[in-house]
Image: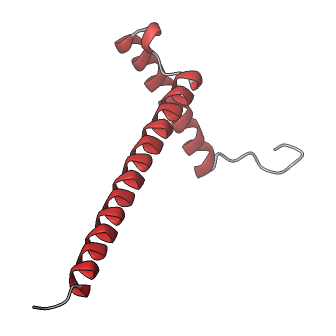
Amino acid sequence: MSANGPNHIGLTTISRTVASLAVGVVHTVERAVIGDSRMRTARGNAWEAVCADRARAAQRRELDRLVAELGAARAAARKRRDARDDLPVS
């Protein structure tokens, strides 16, 4: 027995150990399969996130442009209709 009480291996200890071993195995397999040059890194992940943010921003700008274009076309059609309705009836 230790000074802190009995030394038990609990479920959380086993889970952490298994998870740690699994991460190590996955990392080793990934390195062996794809090679060191193609390993995912924090820098690579960050760059992918930046690129994804830029792509989403470009899509948002395109959607905003289309909505504005549709709004302008609708306003122009309404203006033409109102002008046509103001013409005297013969």
Q: Quadrant of residue 34?
A: top left
Q: Nearer the viewer, residue 90 or 29?
A: 90
Q: Quadrant of residue 56?
A: top left
Quadrant of image for the N terminus: top right
- Scheme of image coloration: secondary structure
Q: Is residue 48 left or right of residue 84?
A: right
Farthest-out residue, left: 90
Position of residue 53 measured from the top left corner of the image (x, y, whole percent): 50, 40
- For residue 59, above or below residue 73: above
Position of residue 35 measured from the top left corner of the image (x, y, whole percent): 41, 9
- For residue 3, above or below residue 51: below
Residue shown at 43%/13% (left/top)?
38
- For residue 86, above or below residue 64: below
Position of residue 61 measured from the top left corner of the image (x, y, whole percent): 44, 47
Residue shown at 34%/54% (left/top)?
66
Position of residue 79 measured from the top left corner of the image (x, y, whole percent): 31, 74
